[in-house]
């Protein structure tokens, strides 16, 4: 793909009025790129195979290929690392679940309800203050409205009648039209 300054300027800095035109151009470029990809596919594969065998057509292709290979290797390393971490994590979860089940079975059979309540009280801070409600601190004055508020009701109007179909349209004199034609 060729670097086009005007296209990039229109895409990022132009008014939103030009978005449709930029999108049309980008869609056309995508279709063109797909056609070119299909057209040159076999030649590209052949050149890549040659480059993997250290047969580079020119120096710029060598540098580009080196960058591509580094990126691919980094991607593969990331995938492998993530897979190993996930496998290790799932094994740890399975081990912890098995250990927790055995610990829970042993501890719950030994502890009574009183022991659990006592442990909760010793761990949690007990509040001795009584907190008042807002009603104790605020004087509330109630105002009674004497006038009823009139709320409008929604009317069901049928405006799709024959009268409304031709309302405001002048009737044509057909007799005058027939006389002028003859």
Image: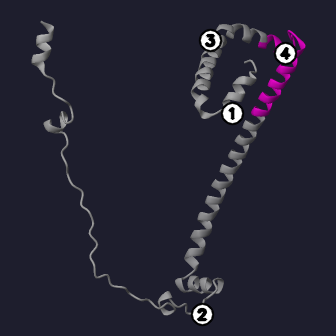
Label 1: how many residues lie within 10 Å, few (<14), some (14-19) or many (20+)? few
> Tag 4, which secondary structure?
helix
Residue at x-position 49% and y-position 90%: 138
Q: Are marks 3 and 2 in contact (CB under 8 Å)?
A: no
Q: Nearer the viewer, mark 4 or mark 1?
A: 1
Start and end of the magenta stretch?
48-76
Disc ID at residue 128: 2
Q: Earlier in the sequence, mark 4 or mark 3?
A: 3
Q: CA distance from mark 1 to mark 3?
A: 27 Å
| Residue under pointer 3 | 35
Question: Which residue occupies 68% across, 54% down?
Answer: 92
Q: Quadrant of residue 128?
A: bottom right
User: Counting other residues with Cα less than 10 Å from the Cα at mark 4, is it few (<14), some (14-19), or many (20 or more)?
Assistant: some
Which residue is the site of mark 4?
Answer: 61
Depth-wise, is mark 3 or mark 2 nearer the camera? 3
Q: Secondary structure at mark 2?
A: loop
In the picture, measured across the screen, residue 162 lies left or right of residue 126, that is left
In this view, the mark in front (1 or 3): 1
- The quadrant holding residue 161 is top left
Vertical order, 28 against 155 (above or below) = above
Q: Earlier in the sequence, mark 2 or mark 1?
A: 1
* Crowd rating for badge 3 (residues with CA inside 10 Å; few <14, some 14–19, many 20+): few
Horizontal arrangement in the rendering, residue 139 relative to residue 80 (left or right): left
């Amino acid at each position: 793909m060729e670097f086009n300054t005007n296209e990039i300027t229109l895409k990022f800095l132009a008014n939103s009025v030009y978005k449709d035109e930029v999108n049309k151009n980008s869609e056309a470029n995508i279709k063109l790129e797909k056609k070119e990809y299909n057209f040159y596919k076999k030649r590209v594969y052949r050149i890549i195979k040659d480059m993997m065998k250290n047969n580079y057509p020119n120096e710029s292709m060598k540098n580009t290929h080196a960058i591509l290979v580094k990126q691919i290797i980094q991607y593969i390393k990331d995938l492998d690392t993530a897979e190993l971490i996930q496998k290790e994590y799932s094994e740890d979860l399975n081990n912890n679940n098995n250990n927790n089940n055995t610990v829970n079975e042993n501890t719950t059979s030994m502890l009574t309800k009183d022991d659990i309540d006592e442990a909760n009280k010793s761990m949690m801070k007990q509040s001795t203050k009584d907190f008042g409600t807002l009603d104790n601190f605020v004087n509330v004055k109630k105002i009674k409205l004497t006038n009823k508020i009139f709320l409008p009701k929604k009317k069901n109007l049928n405006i799709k009648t024959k009268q409304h179909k031709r309302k405001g349209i002048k009737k044509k004199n057909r007799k005058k039209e027939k006389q002028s034609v003859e």
